[in-house]
Amino acid sequence: MTPAADPSGHGSPARTHDLVHDAALRWPDRPALIEGATVLSYSQLDRRAEDLARALVARGAAGDMTIGVGAPRSAEHVIAALAVWKAGGVYVPLATDLPPARIADMLGIAGVRLTVGPGLTISEVADPPVDQPLAGLPPAPESEDGAVACVYFTSGSTGRPKAVALTHAGIVNEALWSHDAFSIRPEDRSGWLASPGFAISRWELWTPLTAGAAIAVSEEGAVREPGALRDWLLDQGVTWSIVVTGLAERLFGVPWPANCPLRLLVTGGEQLRVWPRGLPFDVVNSYGVTEASSVRLAARLDPFEGSAFEGSTFEGSTFEGSRSTGPLPSVGRPIRGTRVHVLDDALAPVPDGEVGELFIGGFGLARGYLGDPEQTARRFVPDPFHGGGRRLYRTGDLVRVDEKGQVEFVRRLNDDPKVNGVRVDLAAVEAALLASPGVTGAAAAIRVHDGERPRLVGYLVADDDDRPAPDEVIDAVARRLPPQMVPGVLVRLPSLPLLSSGKVDRGRLPEPTADIVFRGRPATARDETEQQVIDVFREVLGRSDIGAHDDFFGLGGDSMGVARVRQSLLERHGIDVPYTLIFRQRTPRRICTAASDGGEEPR
């Protein structure tokens, strides 16, 4: 494998700050960062970073020292990151909204000795527990510059953080590919929307700043609601931007002017669940993991012009003739400098088109986890197809490849949600909820409350106070998905709880207690048989407020209750309904429809 092209003429491999410095030499007066009314040119950015780098060296900064940057999303944060690199250090972005104990834990794991905070103030960390945090990392491949650029933490709000050591080679490869694939030019302007501690912000920052383009720094409020974000993007004249998936899906649904300056929107962070249509800009769906320098695969959802994705390789397997079965948008092909393998548990290639675990190789793999050699060895395995110290990262994601050679995300390997013993694809449920008329935001989760059986809960956001009705949502989902994937309970929320990254905070989705369940007025029966089923449901569940669309399991029913429903229908009304039909159809209307169709599931 050959290193990513270095257009700057450096004798050694170009590192991120080298390319930003080159941009400052070529375009000194062009705007680099736009923060409200303040505009920082490339020459000003480079000069201020040089000044801070000298101050860091005076405070003891040296080669491979990990230095924390606790400034919020701002021009100051970018100055600090560049200064850390110019001083020979390793940049450690710190989320400013975390509890102090959590930040202290992160500082300890990364062995941070110096921090840069708001106002570019430098502080020393007393007695860091780790003297040489990078010493335990495995060596880089023989053909790749292994210099560590930054450390990102991957765990959520609970559990011990995992500190991922990423290289300049990965950032540079990602940036140079993006320049070609997205036609990034100095005239472009991008938006910085993500939290600095979220790995996707690395892509937002260093792709434009290594191309001489400008970055508009968003205010906190501008990144939460789609209407406000659209207005901000238009006001700032943003031409391309990266938006976390959940927010991007809502952004697709707001009105856009035909002469919109935005020409490209890249979505990433989660599985995309909707197909955007009729927008005045192109949409790229991307897949990435922090351990592999963020983006590794990408798909332009409109036909991609040119050959920007050439140089990608799927190695160790053949994909011609495979069939696509996934209803969700693909995550595309590997970017330049990336190798992708779909393997089984024995690290052997899976047959064409079948599901296997996604392994990633090539430029950009992290060196490993700081202070955790066991986890590093478990997730970064020797590449069985190439020598020279190359490794593969096992993502823990199950995928398949379609007949066009594009990767379809299936599910997380250890994400095994089941209801009634049947696996449920939560992304597909969320996609169906989002396709329901009037729904602008959606999430799905499996909930177990007070020892009850698991229930599939759909959470939805709608802009209209009166629409949609619960039965409209359930009917819309039932037309798209099999019965076991139709939520038994709906909860309507004013907004979805979000992490600082913009992803849905599933841990804060509320329990579907009786006071918040979204039911509406119980639907009346269409005929006598349907009323008889409703009456039996009411008797077995001990409730008088059940209608034709109410889900037996969503209201607390279980397998013993299904047996009582079947027996009561047979004995009292002479209706012989198979146990499995009740179990699968779950609502009076769907049970009656399926029974009248000779047991076939309604469509």
Image (spheres, grey):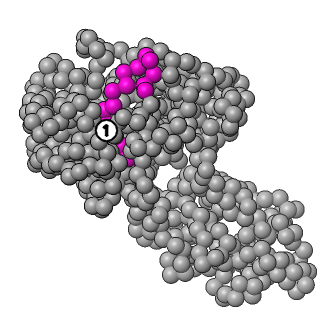
Q: Amino acid at mark 1?
A: Gln
Horizontal side of residue 189 vs 572, given as left or right:
left
- Tell me the quarter of the image containing the C terminus: bottom right
Residue at left offset 69%, top offset 55%: 423
Residue at left offset 23%, top offset 41%: 67
Image position, residue 531 (x, y; %): 76, 81
Q: Is residue 537 above or below residue 202?
A: below
Looking at the image, which is closer to me, 12 or 207?
12
What's drawn in magenta, residue-wise? 139-154
Residue for badge 1: 132
Horizontal side of residue 200 vs 26, given as left or right:
right
Image position, residue 435 (x, y; %): 54, 53
Looking at the image, which is closer to me, 280 or 127?
127
Image position, residue 444 (x, y; %): 55, 60
Residue at left offset 9%, top offset 36%: 58
Q: Count residues near mark 1 (Cα–Cα under 10 Å), then give few for <14, some for 14-19, many for 20+.
A: some
Tell me if residue 143 is in the magenta stretch: yes
Horizontal side of residue 414 vs 492, given as left or right:
right
Chief secondary structure of the magenta span? loop
Tell me if residue 308 is in the magenta stretch: no
Horizontal side of residue 439 vs 530, given as left or right:
left
Residue at left offset 29%, top offset 56%: 104
Kind of element beneath mark 1: loop
Res. 181 image quadrant? top left
Image position, residue 193 (x, y; %): 30, 46
Looking at the image, which is closer to me, 501 or 277?
501
Q: Is residue 174 above or below residue 294?
A: above
- Residue 236 seen by the camera: no
